[in-house]
Each structure stands twice: as structure tokens, then as C-alpha cells.
Image (tube, rainbow, N blue to C red):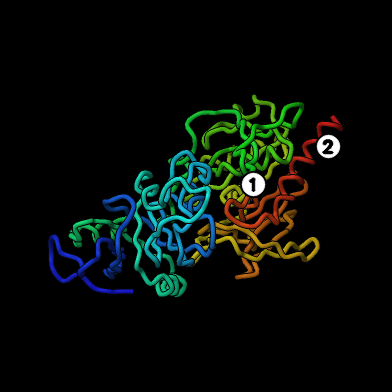
Amino acid sequence: MAKATPTGPGTGSAPQGATGALVLADGSILWGRGFGATGAGVGEVCFNTAMTGYQEIMTDPSYAGQIITFTFPHIGNVGANAEDVEADKPRAVGCIVRQDVTEPSNFRSTERFDAWLAAQGQIGISGIDTRALTRRIRLAGAPNAVIAHAPDGRFDIDELLAMARSWPGLEGMDLAKDVTRDEQGDWTGGIWTLGHGYGAAGEGERPHVVAIDYGAKHNIFRNLVRAGARVTVVPAKTSAEAILALKPAGIFLSNGPGDPAATGDYAVPVIRALMDAGLPIFGICLGHQLLALAVGAKTIKMHQGHRGANHPVKRHADAVVEITSMNHGFAVDAATLPEGAVVTHTSLFDGSNCGFEMPAKRAFSVQYHPEASPGPQDSFYLFEKFVSNLSNQNAEG
């Protein structure tokens, strides 16, 4: 991992062959080879340990405001296609990889990853010692930085450093409002099958779930449909009155980016009103954190966050260990959960809270992404649990 400190003002040339730069707020510069879009973008540098699913990761709205370091070296080797995306518009700032992007080798590929990245407006840098950068993040925390790609190898280092230092960071930042959908709509897609792509949602009587979109991945809605629900998706700032007017059987709180305390300014009163209405609630990731805030708990900024598809989580009910997909930089402070809250899941990496439920409020949530994409499918049972409860409720009613 090349490291340098800028010594002079104005535009400067990179080391020979370098067309990409990661300029950290502390003045360090990591040189590499740029690919994808050209230009510069600012964000928080994090790392993801997944070995597959880079396209899903780059299109996960929870990565808004972040530059993703992939610890697996071979990124781009299976190309890109139109099916492996998790949002209508990518939100991650860019990515950092060890090896140069190669020609794809996969029958589903329709274009190279670097070409796809350029079309999305996302910047990539290869040739970085990602092991050293990951170690740095683990020891010192996730830094603010600018990722830049200039094919001519010329960068205005002073300007890039100023961008990195002036960016306020994710703490206190509400990003859900920037990534949520603009309008309410019914979700009509089903699950993916080889050779057929994505199917349609099933017909017939299904319990109605209203999903609040704080930056949701598409596979969440597909899994709700797979579990037997009919899904209506609403924007993050939809009022409780408008949601209740849809006559839902239950409420889903989605994943999303940013500081939950900031998003909670408008989300928490809505969630509390929905709980007071007696509606069952299921939240994941940011939705988990917002549910915790709604019952009086607090959230905290993590040192490095959890991002990957191989995170072990203990399920307290039966001591089973689930291997989960995660993407979060904030966590629920379990010590602040109120009386009546039952801790259901705990990270085996660092002991942080990964799930709780409020039986009296008919609400539960988990910190990880049970819909995977990418990642293991150990936790699909949570969708079944939620939708089954709604079906039972409808039958009893």
C-alpha cells in the first residue's frame, strides 16, 4: 500500500502508471489504477469480507456515503448483468480492490464489471494493498476519504484533501431521505430462478404488508412475497395516518444508510404510532435500530462496522449459530433496551446486539440482512415467522 503526504500546492502527477488515488483525511495517499467512472467522490472507507455478490453490494442503498474495500481479491471476475442489482440506482461512492478487473468468466455475464461500474457513475481503484487498508480500518476506525480516477494521472491533491477533511462523516447524517423511493407502490416481483429470471408475485389472498423504504434492497420484498405476503412499499417519510389508511396486516422496516438517530427524528414517531395501533412489526438493519429508538433504546457508532456475508450470530432461543449477511456501521446499545425487551440474537464477533423483540408490542427485529443477496440464506425463517403471524392473525380475525 503506497503511502505519501502531499508536499506542494496545486495539480500534481501520480507515480508512473497510477491513475487512481485514495486521499485520506489524515493526508495519506494510496495510489492505484483507476477504473469505472472518472472524477472524484467523498465518503467513509469501509471493508466488506464477502467472497461473492460484488454487484449486489455496490447497489445496496445502505452503502450510500461509503467507499467499499473488498477484502476478496478477485472482484469483477464473473462480470455484471442486469439481474444482480438491489436498487434502481447505485448509492455507494466507489470501491477499492486488489487485482485488476479481468475479462469475465460466467455464462450469466453481459458486460465487464468495470464497464458496468462506469455506467453507474461509480469509481474503482485496483492495485491497492487491501489487507493493509483493512488492518488500518480495524485499528484506527473507518476514515473519511476521497476516491479519484484520472486517466491522465493528474490530480489536484490539495483540492481532494480539502474535500476529505471537510466532509462531516456519517455520524449525525440522515441518508435515508436521499435513497428512499419517491412514491408509494405495490411490489409485483417474485423470486429469481435459473433460466427464467424474476417471476411475478403470487395471486390469491395474502396478508398485506406495508414496507417502509429507508433504503431497501429489492430482495427484501421478494422474500416477503416468497413467504406469502402482499407488499406495498412507501417512502421513508410517509405518515402513520397514510400507512394506516392502507389497512396493513403488518409493518416492515427496511435497511438503509446513515445515522439512525438522525433518521429517527421523523421515523420514530411514525413507528411508535404504528405500535400503538397494535400492528405487528418486523425490522432489519436500520429498521432494527429505528425500532430500538422507538422503544427508548439508544444507538452507537461502531469502530469499524460489520460488512460481509460470513458473520456468525447466536440465536438465543436454541443456541443455533446463523451465518449472516451484514452491512452496518451503527449498532443498538443492548444495555439501553427497556424492560420488556428480549434480546434474541448476538454477534459472535464482538458481542454486539443483533436482534430483540418486544412481545407486548408484537414487534421484533434483527441487525443483519436475512434476505441475503449476497450471502447465506440461514435466516429466511424470519420472513416466514413474520408472515405466518400475520396469516394467523387474519384467520383469528
**Kind of element beneath mark 2:** helix
Q: Is residue 113 left or right of residue 339?
A: left
Q: Which quadrant would residue 350 be assigned to in this image?
A: bottom right
Relative vertical location of residue 256 with respect to residue 270 in this rendering, above or below: below
Residue 344: x %, y % from top left = 73, 58
Figure check: 367 above or below 311: above
The image position of residue 383, as x and y in percent, is: 71, 45
Image disc number at residue 283: 1
Q: Residue at x 30, y 66 (%)?
A: 32
The answer to whether 69 is drawn above or below residue 90 in the figure is: below
Q: Residue at x 70, y 36 (%)?
A: 250
Res 261 seen here: no
Q: Residue at x 59, y 33 (%)?
A: 233
Screen quadrant of the N terminus: bottom left
Q: Which residue is mark 2?
A: 392
Q: Residues within 10 Å of mark 2 (few under 14, many from 20)?
A: few
Q: Which circle's residue, 2 or 1, is located before the other in the chain?
A: 1
Residue 147 visible in image? yes
The amino acid type found where label 1 is placed reads Gly
- For label 1, the crowd category at 10 Å Cα-Cα, with few meaning under 14, some 14 to 19 and many 20 or more, is many
CB-based contact (under 8 Å), mark 2 and mark 1? no
Q: In front: 151, or 92?
A: 151
Quadrant hosting residue 127: bottom left
Query: Which amino acid, by three-letter code, is at mark 2?
Result: Asn
Q: Quadrant of the C terminus?
A: top right
Q: What is the quadrant of residue 144 in the picture?
A: bottom left
Closer to us: 285 or 356: 285
Image location (x, y in percent) of residue 318: 80, 63
Q: Marks 2 and 1, Cα distance to the nearest angstrom? A: 19 Å
- Left or right: where 207 falls relative to 305: right
